[in-house]
Image (tube, rainbow, N blue to C red):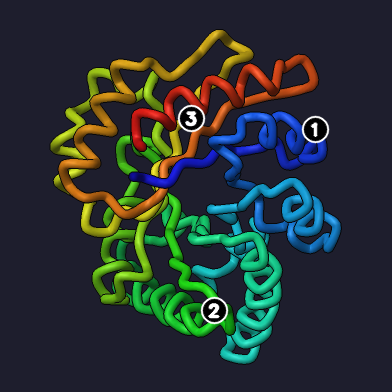
Amino acid sequence: MINCAIRINDHAWQDWLEPVTATKRLRAIECDAGLFASPDFSAQLNKHGIRCLHARDILPNDTAAFLSESVTEDNLLVLRRNLFGLMISAAATDTQVFSLQLRLDRIAPEQSARQIEHHTRLLQPLLAAPLDSPYQLAIQVSQPRPYPQSHEWEYAMAICRQANSPRIGLAMHFYPDDFHGQGELKSLLDSCFAHLRVICFHYNPLLSETLFDDEQITWSEELKSRDYQGLVVFCPETDKRSNLLGVCEDAVSWADFYS
């Protein structure tokens, strides 16, 4: 069985509590890690029996932007201490993976070796957060790539190899409508499976986009055949017009393929 979750709208998280709870079989979410700065968020998840399996963006965007610049060890210590605080709060809801957007495309190619080492030194100490349950860190990457000349994947894979830990891997944001015609699933997984910890399927119901059953069946069969131990997350775009119960029911039907 592969654990599945649904991404909630971070700006309207209270609206998701009842629809997620009503699914009974998919009481698991992904959210922005910043929500755990509010004690009420964790309390409400626990009250409704909802787990947060994937805490996304534990590194704030403004922090990620300057990481490729010169950062002192003192600054890194403060950063780690702040991240530990968020991770401890999230762990109370059974979080299994914490992911980061490292803005790797900001790295100049001639500085890549030094920056890969720099980012590896940032991540490795985060494995020492004082949590009671096991957890993993994942570097966010996109498929298809953000743009043709992007080095995001190469640098992220290099960090994983240099870190040399099964607890540091990749969180892949997958956009099915954009991926069509750009490659094959098998070759994609062959290239990154050893480091894959989270797969996030993006779609926009507001634009009548959906995830197709046959494609999800293909994904589930391929992942099961490889004994995938990571997470699958369904990531709908929603707003106030959305029928959240219907969105959650769709996610449950896809999650059944991974059971």
Q: Quick check: marks 2 and 1 in contact, CB under 8 Å?
A: no
Left or right? Give the position of 14 relative to 164: right
Q: Earlier in the sequence, mark 3 or mark 2?
A: 2
Task: Identify whether 160 is placed above or below 9.
Answer: below
| Mark before the other along the chain sequence, 2 or 1 | 1
Which sits in the foreground, 71 or 19? 19
Q: Quadrant of residue 86?
A: bottom right
Residue farthest to the bottom, as pictured: 74
Q: Secondary structure at mark 1?
A: helix
Residue at label 1?
15
Residue 30: image location, x then y, percent = 59, 46
The relative height of residue 119 versus residue 103 in the rendered view (above or below) is: below
Amino acid type for the residue under numbered disc 3: His
In the image: residue 50, left or right of residue 39: left
Comparing 70 with 93, the one in front is: 93
Marking on residue 101: none
Q: Name the quarter where the C terminus is drawn.
A: top left
Residue 16 x, y percent position in the rendering: 74, 34
Query: Where does the image place residue 188, in percent across and percent down from the top left?
Result: 20, 39
Q: Are marks 1 and 3 in contact (CB under 8 Å)?
A: no
Image quadrant assignment for residue 184: top left
For mark 3, does the 10 Å Cα neighbourhood hold few (<14), some (14 to 19), or many (20 or more) residues?
many
Please name the residue shown 62% across and 67% down the image.
91
Residue 163 makes an appearance in the image: yes
Q: Secondary structure at mark 2?
A: loop
Q: Mark 3 sits on what residue?
A: 202
Kindly identify the residue that appears in the image at 48 percent across and 39 percent down.
233
Q: Nearer the viewer, mark 2 or mark 1?
A: 1
Q: CA distance from mark 1 to mark 3?
A: 20 Å
Query: In the rendered picture of this protein, how many numbered marks are placed on residues?
Result: 3
Identify residue for label 2.
70
